[in-house]
Image (tube, grey):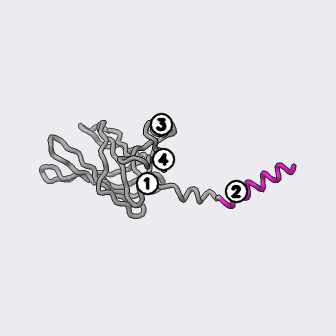
Amino acid sequence: MTLFHLRFVLLVAACSLLYPESKAADKVDPISGVWSWDASGRPGGIRKSEMKLWKEGESLKGSLHVGGRELPIKNAKVDGNRLTFDVEVAFNGVSHKTTYSGVVKDGTIKGNIQPDPNPNGQTRIRDWDAKRERSLWVCTTHNPRHTATDAQEMAKLSREMGCVWDR
């Protein structure tokens, strides 16, 4: 082994002691990201649902994408790996609330979706099984926050708006 190779091996060993992989893994937020799931639609069809979630300090922020609309989440709470939030949508001038609650584990959220009762007073609780599709970067220099899921989106928003990014 040459002196160069020996120095390289020692450098790699020193770096692995100073920056073990577990430190980096501990910093990854298991909730922030782009999540998707299949939801039952009308009449009896399946539609893909997607949401973006991110943490700002102790607060949970995000939006749900349904039927071409982006709906902000409200009343969001995180307690360890449990989360709950509401989404409101208006139909014919009447606001309807749906509550999402679940447990985050290993890149999935398992829980339930509970809409407001229908006019007959019935509530149809559905299972919720979301999968984390990709990471999400949040522009911290603007409010409301802008988000990006890849380097191309980040570069575009950085050029156009001067975004500073946080994961």
Q: Which residue is mark 4?
A: 165
Q: CA distance from mark 1 to mark 4?
A: 17 Å
Q: Are marks 4 and 2 in contact (CB under 8 Å)?
A: no
- Relative to residue 123, is residue 4 drawn left or right? right
Residue 74 badge: none
Q: Nearer the viewer, residue 77 or 103?
A: 77
Q: Amino acid at mark 4?
A: Trp
Furthest-front residue in this view: 162
Q: Amino acid at mark 3?
A: Arg
The mark that comes first in sequence, 4 or 3, is 3
Q: Residues within 10 Å of mark 4 (few under 14, many from 20)?
A: some
Q: Kindly state the secondary structure of the residue where label 3 is placed.
A: helix
Tell me what residue is drawn at x 64 percent, y 59 percent: 20
Residue 31 badge: 1
Q: Which residue is mark 2?
A: 15
- Residue 88 drawn at (x, y percent): 24, 48
- Residue 39 drawn at (x, y percent): 32, 43
Q: Residues within 10 Å of mark 2 (few under 14, many from 20)?
A: few
Q: Which residue is mark 3?
A: 159
Q: CA distance from mark 3 to mark 2?
A: 34 Å
Furthest-right residue in this view: 2
Q: Amino acid at mark 1?
A: Ile
The mark that comes first in sequence, 1 or 4, is 1
Q: CA distance from mark 1 to mark 2?
A: 29 Å
The mark that comes first in sequence, 3 or 2, is 2
Comparing labels 4 and 3, the label whose residue is closer to the camera: 3
- Residue 85 drawn at (x, y percent): 31, 55
Q: Are marks 3 and 2 in contact (CB under 8 Å)?
A: no
Q: CA distance from mark 3 to mark 1?
A: 28 Å
Q: Kindly state the secondary structure of the residue where label 4 is placed.
A: strand
Q: Residues within 10 Å of mark 1 (few under 14, many from 20)?
A: many
